[in-house]
Amino acid sequence: MKLSRDKIDIALARNSLTITNLSKRYGVSRARMNVILNSREVTAICAGRMANSLEVDVTEILED
């Protein structure tokens, strides 16, 4: 699965969150969050946790 950085940025803006806030909700450091956001592929669990942290459906943050 590939996360869409553009869609994540939209979800961040919609929820008035920063990467730091997102990393706290997700439960990792800011540096680790950047690694996750810039990775080519993520697991289904990672995508699900990201969606829960952003309070969106997982399909909203995956690339088409």
Image (spheres, helix red, strand yellow):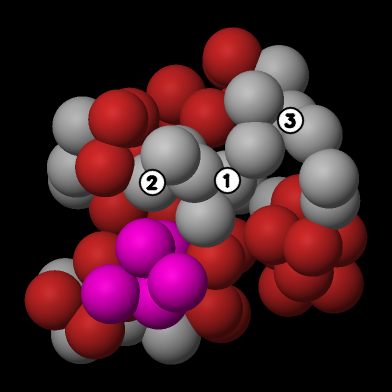
Numbered-mark total: 3
Asked if the residues shown at circle 1 and circle 3 are in contact, with their CB atoms under 8 angstroms apart, the answer is yes
Instruction: Answer with left or right where residue 12 lies relative to residue 33.
Output: left
Quote the CA–CA distance across marks 1 and 2: 6 Å
Where residue 59 sits, quadrant-wise, is top left
Residue at mark 2: 61
For this rendering, which residue is in front, 42 or 49? 42
* Identity, as a three-letter code, of the amino acid under mark 3: Val
Q: Main secondary structure of the magenta part?
A: helix
Q: Secondary structure at mark 1?
A: loop
- Relative to 22, residue 59 above or below: above
Is residue 20 positioned above or below 56 on the image?
Answer: below
The residue sitting at 28% across, 75% down in the picture is 10
Residue at image mark 3: 42
**13 above or below 52?**
below
What span is in magenta? 6-10
Label 2 Cα neighbours within 10 Å, binned few <14 / some 14-19 / many ≥20: many
Q: Position of residue 64 (x, y in %)?
A: 43, 39
Of 22 and 47, the residue lying toward us: 47
Left/right placement of residue 13 relative to residue 2 reads left
Q: Evaluate if marks 1 and 2 touch, with contact meaning CB atoms under 8 Å apart.
A: yes
Residue that lies at the very extreme toward the top in this rendered image = 44
Q: Which of the two labelled residues, at mark 3 and mark 2, occupies the earlier sequence position? A: 3
Label of residue 3 in the image:
1
Q: Is residue 30 magenta?
A: no
Dot 3: what SS? loop
Q: Where is residue 37 drawn, in percent x and y?
A: 69, 59
Q: Earlier in the sequence, mark 1 or mark 3?
A: 1
Q: Earlier in the sequence, mark 1 or mark 2?
A: 1
Pick the front one: 39 or 51: 39
